[in-house]
Amino acid sequence: MNWGGLQSILSGVNKYSTVFGRVWLSMVFVFRFLVFVVAAQRVWADESKDFVCNTAQPGCVNVCYDHIFPISHIRLWALQLIFVTCPSLMVVAHVTLREEKDSKYSAMHEGSHLYANPGKKRGGLWWTYLVSLIFKAGFDASFLYILYYVYEGYDMPRLSKCSLEPCPNTVDCYISRPTEKKIFTIFMVVSSAVCILICICEMVYLIYKRIQKLIRKKVVESFETTSLTARRSRSKSTRSKLSVREDPTNTASIQNLCNVMTEAAPSEKKK
């Protein structure tokens, strides 16, 4: 399986990821991909060949092996890694679509751009990124549950008993290197749980930043509305004061009253 090709594709996700997303991608490739490719495949390479039961009945060993290992750990983990990493391609595809739209818009409108930064998590890209996180955490949790449900836990017993047909009676079956396989199983389970925790932290971080931005925007808008209302009220009060002070009708009335009183004073003295 060509894991290098998938790694080269997903390495572009780093450009559009947050700090938590970069940590998640490093966790997946270092603690899951490398361990899976380098060590885990070799540990489980002999699981069918070295599976031994204390019976010579034809077909009994195969039936017991299929009962004890319904699905191989290696194949289950391979499916898990594929399903977990594919949602990141949604973000890459969305950014690529934005870049194509921006290039077409720029060609039609003489250099002006539709997006200032196509990789910035705004609008639909923010929702795509959030949905990809939900899918990644959901896939990891689902595969952990499947592994626990199929094998009834994360333990790797040294001895397993089988009484299925065509076995003549209850036989004892032994697997190779059970302790080593148990250690790798627990390691993969813990690394998956850590990746789920990182996805949850990133979702909380994205939602917190979005709420903080909306609150800040509302505060700025309310402050601008209040300041604009205050300026209008001040301008109205200033205009009313100026109109009262500079009213020519009031000035003429006062002047006429003074003239009448001045003319009436000498006539009274003559009488």
Image: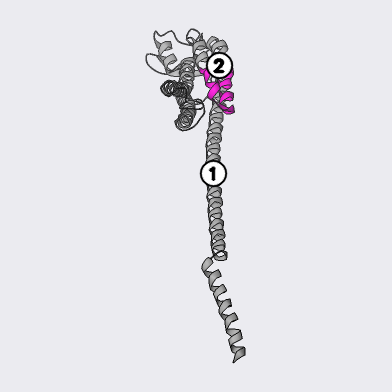
Q: Residues within 10 Å of mark 1 (few under 14, many from 20)?
A: few
Indicate the position of residue 16 as horizontal and vertical percent values.
Answer: 53, 24
Residue segment shown in magenta: 10-31
Q: Quadrant of the C terminus?
A: bottom right
Q: Secondary structure at mark 1?
A: helix
Tell me which colouring the rendered structure shows. one colour
Residue that carries the numbered disc 2 in the rendered image: 181
| Position of 44 relative to 109 (above/below) | above
Query: Looking at the image, which is closer to me, 197 or 187?
Result: 197
Residue 183: x and y, percent? Answer: 59, 19
Tell me if I can see residue 155 in this picture: no
Q: Can you identify the residue that label 1 sits on?
A: 215
| Residue 215 vs residue 186, the one in the foreground | 215
**48 is higher (above) or lower (below) than 110:** above
Residue 267 occupies quadrant: bottom right
Residue 239 location, x and y as percent? 54, 59
